[in-house]
Every structure is written in structure tokens, then in C-alpha cells.
Image (cartoon, grey):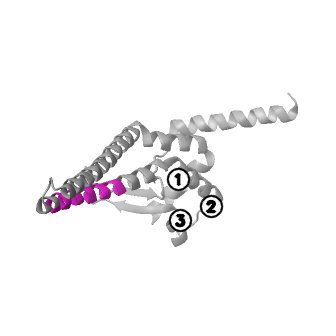
Amino acid sequence: MDIVLENMKRVFMNVNLFEEQFAKKQMEAYGEEKKKELSEKRKELSKVKKQFSEIDILIQKIYEDNASGKLSDERNATMSISYEKEQQELKESIVTLEEYLSTETDKTENLQRFIDKVKRITEIRELTPELIHEFIEKIVVSSPRYFDGKRYQIVDIYYNGIGIIRGLTPEEMEESFERALERIRKNLLYELGE
């Protein structure tokens, strides 16, 4: 409970103080590798849809061949069953691929929704069921490991819609802080008429 609460406080602070850097960091983590994977999945989906359509044509062809007497009823039934089974498998693949692509490509929208929800929270004092339900998808606790006689245990916290959040490094926080100070200075100078 304490680990999750501290993580949420840190994440919420990063969002509220360094929103631009936070969003940039999360999208970078999403990165090139994910874009490449999505591209491959789209190609695979296109290929599977094409195969599905080709089987439709083959089914139509064997029906016509059977009707014209070129193909026996027994052979027609065997081929039809085979094609329909393959087509059903392709249909399941299409559904799976489309679901995967729709959830993965909504990453920027999910990130913005997450940021908006965080901004509505002023302060977290305790971990409530409502807070967990609204922000946490799942918590994965790995088995303990020992290193130099000390016990370590990794806890991965997956936030709704965006997964594991990559924290800002101290350098990124400093850079964002400096930019925020510079904006404040410029606004003050503008208000003072200088």
C-alpha cells in the first residue's frame, strides 16, 4: 500500500509540475519499437483480410464448379468444410488484431485523459479504493530476489490506459523547472511593462 501510494504521489507531482515533459517522456517510452510493431501488425491484418477475401472467392468457385458438374458433391463438401474452417480461423485473427491495434493506437488519447484526471486531484493523503479503481489497472509484484544479502522485490504499477509510467529523471525535472521559472520571469516582466 505504501509503495503504491508513494508512486502515485510522485506520478501526480510529475504530471502537475512538469506536464509537458511527462507527456513527452511517456510517448518516447512508447517509442519507435512500438511504432514498428504496430506497423507490422497493420501489415499482418491487411494480409489476413486479403486471405479471408480470397477464400470467399474460392468458396464461390467450388460452388460454381459443383453446380456445373465439374466437382463432385463429396469433394465440394470436403473443400467447403476446409475453406470454412480456415476462414473462421482468419476471422478470429482479424478480430484479435483489430482489438490489439485499437487499444495500442489510443495511447495519446489515453495519456491526455490520464493527465486530465490527475489534474483534478489536489492531494493524495491515503490510498482509497476509488483512487485505485480510477487510476490503477494492475499491480504486479515479482518474487523476492537477494543481492548482497539484501532482499529486493520489484513492484510494477500499471496505470489505466497507459501502463507503466516512466518517471522523469532528475535532469529532466531540473530542465522543466528552469523552463517554468523562465516563463514566470517573462510573465512578470510583461506585467511590469518591461
| Image marks 1 and 2: residues in contact by CB distance under 8 Å | no
Judged left or right of residue 11, residue 100 is: left
Spot occupied by residue 2 in the image (x, y as percentages of width and height): 46, 64
* Circle 2 residue: 123
The kind of residue on which mark 2 rests is: Glu
Q: Which residues are magenta?
A: 77-96
Q: Is residue 130 visible?
A: yes
Q: Quarter holding the C terminus?
A: top right
| Image marks 1 and 3: residues in contact by CB distance under 8 Å | no
Q: Which of these two is toward me, 4 or 107? A: 107
Depicted 136 relative to depicted 61: above or below: below
Q: Residues within 10 Å of mark 1 (few under 14, many from 20)?
A: some
Q: Quarter holding the N terminus?
A: bottom left
Judged left or right of residue 25, residue 85 is: left
- Residue found at x 60% / y 45%: 19
Q: Is residue 95 magenta?
A: yes
The kind of residue on which mark 1 rests is: Asn
Which circle's residue, 1 or 3, is located before the other in the chain?
A: 1
| Secondary structure that dominates the magenta span | helix
Depicted 164 relative to depicted 139: above or below: above
Quadrant assignment, res 143: bottom left
* Circle 3 residue: 134
Q: Secondary structure at mark 3?
A: helix
Which circle's residue, 3 or 2, is located before the other in the chain?
A: 2
State the CA–CA distance, disc 1 to disc 2: 22 Å
Q: Is residue 83 magenta?
A: yes
State the CA–CA distance, disc 3 to disc 2: 15 Å
- Residue found at x 56% / y 40%: 21
Spot occupied by residue 72 in the image (x, y as percentages of width and height): 12, 59
* Circle 1 residue: 110
The kind of residue on which mark 3 rests is: Glu
Mark nearer the viewer, 1 or 3:
1
